Structure formats: structure tokens, C-alpha cells
Image: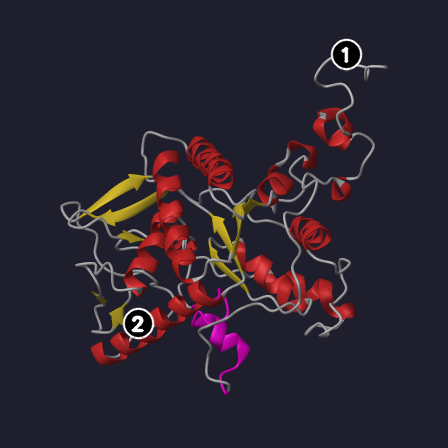
Amino acid sequence: MTRPEKPANPYAGLPAHCFWSRSHRGREVSEIDPVVSGAFRLKPEMRIATAGSCFAQHIARHLQARGYNYFVTEQAHPLISDEVARRYGYGVFSARYGNLYTARQLLQLAQRAHGRFSPLEDVWEAADGRLIDPFRPNIQPGGFCSLSEFRAARETHFAAVRRMMAEADVFVFTFGLTEGWRARADGAVFPLAPGVAGGSFDPEKHEFVNFSVTETIADFTEFASMMRAVNPGVKILMTVSPVPLIATARAGESVIAATAYSKAVLRVACEELRNSLSDCHYFPSYEVITGNYTRGAYYGPDLREVETAGVEHVMGLFMRHYTDTPPGAAPARAAPKTPAADFTASVQKGLEIICDEEMIQRSVD
């Protein structure tokens, strides 16, 4: 009996994508594909929910443009224009929660929506008497007129969050940051430091936090457990935002080094999570944009904002590996909301992403 020939070494016979030189040699930047294969296939009827940092908005827009079922549980009044609705946080994510940069924010939102956590610092009052939600300070331009309006909007929002958690077929979360600010009294985490887009910073009441790998994993694991308690079959897809920090609060650290740390923590956390949680997967949009094979081509003049070509590369790979729809086409059940001839212009307009973090730069300029 002939024995099968043993490989010369463990690397012999591995596919091309396992080797650095073979992964990019002789290819255009737009043709490089680090995905290998999708973990599952999206179907047009599947309810796809998103949350996270600014970059998550690109996924939502492209899915909508191609006729997929982007799951929005908190809708604006039908008479409000799309432009105004977006200014008020409707349709930017699946619910009107604004940017959820950290896993701790995501977890605390779920806990608040289910009555498991009630932050002591629950509302900020502006100089003109209007009220601002500390946990989504930019979703109501000008603030709320009264406490009753504030509370009604909050209850509507919490109901939308609960529905999203209970009914989504796929939940896409984009990890954005590890740095944040929290209340010393109870650990409530804000998307922005008090004083940036509302509230008043008090070092005796507020503190800086830089979440570790261990904390990020624990927070997201607890959130996933909460979601699957009401929605056992939900698929989870994680991504890491390729957008650098706009600023670091660590005075002794360069924002460049702080960005490297933050993204490394988030990437490691995603790897650990996909190995420990069932039906939890990672999509390498971060690697597509930041890979040195691009030679920085996917970043704008500020070396921070992602250019249209980068977004199209990411979403082309997403459609190729996670759907049965060819890139640029719509599934059979629906036509794209944007005509194909205008798609590039639509994407460019879509790059006007709503990002709470931008308020940091504006507050110091």
C-alpha cells in the first residue's frame, strides 16, 4: 500500500493567500482580496442591523443602495425629508443611538434599554435651558425643549433598541475606539467628553478611560449574551474602523502611537471574540484600507478620512463574499434606490458621514 507523500514542510501546498508575496504581487490595489471567504451569505429578506463608529455607516448605505433589507427600527416621520432626518440621527444606524465607539457604550446601551442600568448623570442642560442627551449628544440639533420631550424620545429610542436586538438576523458592529470618558460615580461611558458637545467637564466627576483587550472582550461578550437571550439565531459580524483617532486625551502620547494602540487592541479583541463566540465573524475592512500595499491611496489629504475608492473596494469585497449579488447589481427582489449611472456620485455624497468624534476638533479650533 502506497503511503501518501508527506509535505516537505508545513507551508508546502498552502494556498496563495497564505503568502505575503503571492497575495499582492502583480495585482492592482483594487483587486487585492484579504477576505478569502465569507462566513455566511446574506439574503435579501434578512434584517441587517448596524451600530458602531462612523465607518459602519458606509455598510448601511451600500446595502440600502443595492436593495438589501437594512433594518431600521427608529424611523423619522414620513413628511420629514431624508436630509433633515439624517441630521436628527434617523437612518444613520439601525436606531437613533449615534456613534457607539466602544464595546462598553454598546453594552451600557443594551442595559439601559432593558432597564438594567440607569446612569446618575442622565441629562445635560445647555445655557439656553434646552436639554441634551449625554449618550447621544448630536442626534437632536439644538437639544430638547422640555424634560417631557426628552423622556418621550428616550423611551421611543429604548424601544427601538430592544426591537433591533430581538429581531435582527445579522448584527454588524464596527469597533472604533478604546479611549473614552466616563462618570466616576457609576462608570457610565459617554461618546464624547463632557464639554465637547454638551455638558460641563468636571475632573472630580469625570475620568478618562482607555479600554484594554480584556475589557473590550468582556463587554462585547456580555452584549452578545444579552442579544442572544432574546434572539438566539442572530449572526454577528465585526469590523474595525480604519479611521485614525482625531485626538488622544493622553498628553504624553502622540495621536499616531495612540491610534496604533487602539486599533491593535480592537483587532486582537475581534480575533478572540470570533474564536470564543458562536456565529460571530470578522470582516477585514480595516486591513483593506490600512494595508501597506495601498501606499496610502485610500486616505484623503488629511490622511484620516477614507476616500471613495477605499469604500468601494471594501464594499465590493463584502458583496462578493457575503451575498449572491454581483458588485454593483441589485438582488432580484428589489431595484437599487439610486440608479446605477448615479451610483458613484451617490457614494461620494455618502462620504459625508455623521461622526460625533469630529466635535472634538471643532471644540478646540
Single out the residue that lies furthest toward the bottom. Answer: 79
Is residue 365 in sight in this rendering? no
Left or right: where does residue 140 sit relative to residue 322? left
Q: Position of residue 297 (x, y in %)?
A: 67, 41
Nearer to me, 43 or 31: 43
Inspect the image, locate mark 2, and give the three-letter code of the amino acid beneath it.
Arg
Q: Position of residue 316 (x, y in %)?
A: 71, 53
Characterize the local packing of mark 2: few (<14), some (14-19) or many (20 or more) Cα atoms within 10 angstroms: some
Q: Residue at x 39, y 45 (%)?
A: 221
Q: Residue at x 59, y 45 (%)?
A: 283
Which residue matches tag 1? 8
Inspect the image, locate mark 1, and give the three-letter code of the amino acid beneath it.
Ala
Q: Is residue 346 above or below residue 358?
A: below
Which residue matches tag 2? 154
Left or right: where does residue 176 sit relative to residue 295? left
Q: Residue at x 53, y 53 (%)?
A: 55
Q: Secondary structure at mark 2?
A: helix
Is residue 122 in sight in this rendering? yes
Q: Which residues are magenta?
A: 79-95
Whichever of labels 1 and 2 marks the residue nearer the N terminus, that label is 1
Alpha carbons under labels 1 and 2: distance apart: 63 Å
